[in-house]
Image: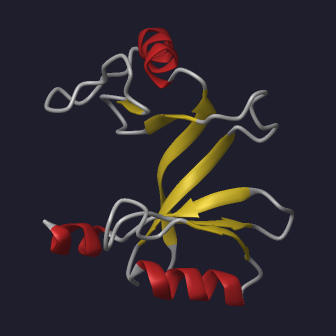
Amino acid sequence: MSVFVSHTTIDCHDAYALSEWWRVALNYAMDADDPNEPGHEECPIHDPETGHTLLFIEVGDDPLPAKRIHLDVRPRERDQADEVAWLLEHGATEVADRRGKYGPGTGWMTLADPEGNQFCVLSSRAELAARG
């Protein structure tokens, strides 16, 4: 069992403006059903060929943190809680628990690898499907 990279997250001050800059630079696309707009705090863009996603998230830190880019991963076979437990057993450390941030079943868990590089564990696809 393992996780897969859901997307690469970039912390920034203006998610919309930065996502637009990178969208044009990389020739990526936004979700036509949920387009990014000025004022959005989270703005994803996608490579139309590979599906790779960059997610720009606004943070209030000024100056921005030194580690501004991190991976967000999803469990392949386990649920989020079991995956977090497995990762902790294998050397990850807990940084912040943001589960439930937007209501039951939402949010993520921020962990760090053995060298301190942070990453977020999201809900599995099965958990997302169950929420509807």
Query: In this view, which residue lies farthest toward the right?
Result: 115
Q: Seen in the image, is 126 located left or right of residue 22? A: left
| Res. 122 image quadrant | bottom left
**Total label count?**
0
* Quadrant position of the C terminus in the picture: bottom left
Q: Position of residue 54 (x, y in %)?
A: 48, 35
From this view, report whether residue 116 is shown above or below residue 60. Answer: below
Which of 68 and 60 lies nearest the eye of the viewer? 60
Q: Seen in the image, is 88 located left or right of residue 81? A: right
Q: Seen in the image, is 43 located left or right of residue 117? A: left
Residue in the image at 37% along x and 29% along y:
47
Residue in the image at 50% along x and 61% along y:
73
From this view, report whether residue 72 is shown above or below residue 69. Answer: below
Q: Position of residue 90 (x, y in %)?
A: 72, 85
Residue in the image at 68% along x and 84% along y:
88
Colour scheme of the picture:
secondary structure
| Res. 42 image quadrant | top left
Q: Position of residue 57 (x, y in %)?
A: 51, 36
Which of 108 and 61 lies nearest the eye of the viewer? 61
Q: Position of residue 77 (x, y in %)?
A: 38, 81
